[in-house]
Amino acid sequence: MVILNRPLRLVVTTFLACLPLVSFANQEIDSAKVNVENAHAVVAEAHHEGGHAEPTDVKSKIKAFVGHHVLDSHDFSFTQDDETGEHWSLPLPVILLDEGLHVFSSAKFHHGKEVAESDGKYYVVNHHDGKIYRTDAAGTITENEETGFPSNFRPIDFSITKTVVSIIGAALLMFFLFTSLARSYAKNKGIASGPGRIFEPIVLYVRDEIAIPNIGEKKYKNYMSYLLTIFFFVLFLNIFGLTPLGINATGNLTITFSLAFLTFLITNLTANKNYWGHIFWMPGVPKLMRIILAPIELLGIFIKPFSLMIRLYANIFAGHIVLMSIIGLMFIFKSWIGSSLSFGLSFLLSILEILVAFLQAYIFTMLSALYFGSAVEEHHHEEAH
């Protein structure tokens, strides 16, 4: 594809002409506004004994926002008025198991600023970890001096959070897309139609380039359902994380642990005797070395899924931190040059994050197929070889 000079110059000129307009969105904070924010911070600190005051300067606000963005939340927060403190958000149901079942709306927390009461028990959301703790009527949170974590009782939480909503959304999206694809195959004699035309090449790629080369033509069909599910599940969750909804599901260590644990279970429950033989009593190796290498090979069983968990978590989590930090620079520079450069860099990084979303889904699926292939591979080594 050849890019003509005139359209390119027009785009660049228009972009440069619009740069000064960006600075108008970043006016200096007047003293009255700062005083209002300081007053809110003092009230919040007095309300939650042992808690921390809300940030008042721009850098602290950005740091707090980035920290809250990567955490799970009990509501979808869309916008906030700093002067009035009013939020526009979508509350989610809170389900707690604490000497009985407690079900109420997260709107009772008022974005973590108030204490929620349910059947005579009081709960607050900790600002640092986003978890719910049981407190007294004043919302007192006592922190452990050694660990720095709250020492309050933490009920069993079955709440529908943003991460849970994203997981349900990804599951429903996959169900409707691929049932539609299956119906189009049956209706059109093996020819995809509708949205299935977009996803059919990806399905064939997972089969021909991931499953068959790593598992083999004889047994790859046994794992295709899982490989397709894990690929599109991770992909959709990664894409959801790039939306303005602020979802960070695959940047959550519990989610990546669950996915890696499934790969661990399938690998070891479907492994053949040759797989276990090469771990505990590897052929072609002196007996003394077998005793030394067996614990190392056994440790490798757990290292493989651990690497799956950390790789996906670290890449997505770091991507969110870097992207949100660069966006925050626009509000720190407060000039058309700095803010414009931050905007351009964040835009390019967002495009790169889309590539990372596909890449991480591919890597997780490919390594899972590789582990499955090693578990069912037929070996023909002889002891004397």
Image: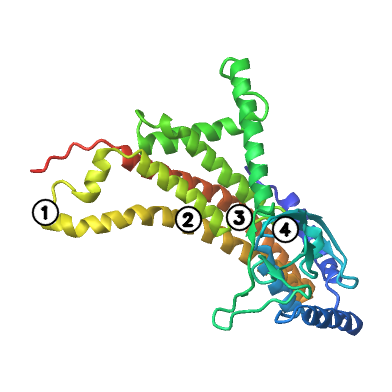
156 vs 135: above or below: above
Per the image, the residue denoted by label 4 is 74
Q: Nearer the viewer, mark 4 or mark 1?
A: 4
Mark 1: which secondary structure? helix
Residue 307 at x, y = what percent?
A: 42, 57
Instruction: Judge depth for marks 2 and 3 and give the one in front.
Output: 2
Q: Earlier in the sequence, mark 2 or mark 1?
A: 1
- N-terminal of the two: label 2 or label 4? 4
| Residue position for label 3 | 353
Q: Nearer the viewer, mark 2 or mark 4?
A: 4
As displayed, is residue 221 above or below residue 12? above
Using residue 332 as the reference point, say whether residue 158 is left or right of it.
left
Q: Amino acid at mark 2?
A: Met
Q: CA distance from mark 3 to mark 1?
A: 49 Å
In percent of the image, x 57 and y 30: which residue is there? 200
Classify 10 Å Cα crowding around label 3: few (below 14), some (14-19), many (20 and above).
many
Helix, strand or loop status at disc 3: helix
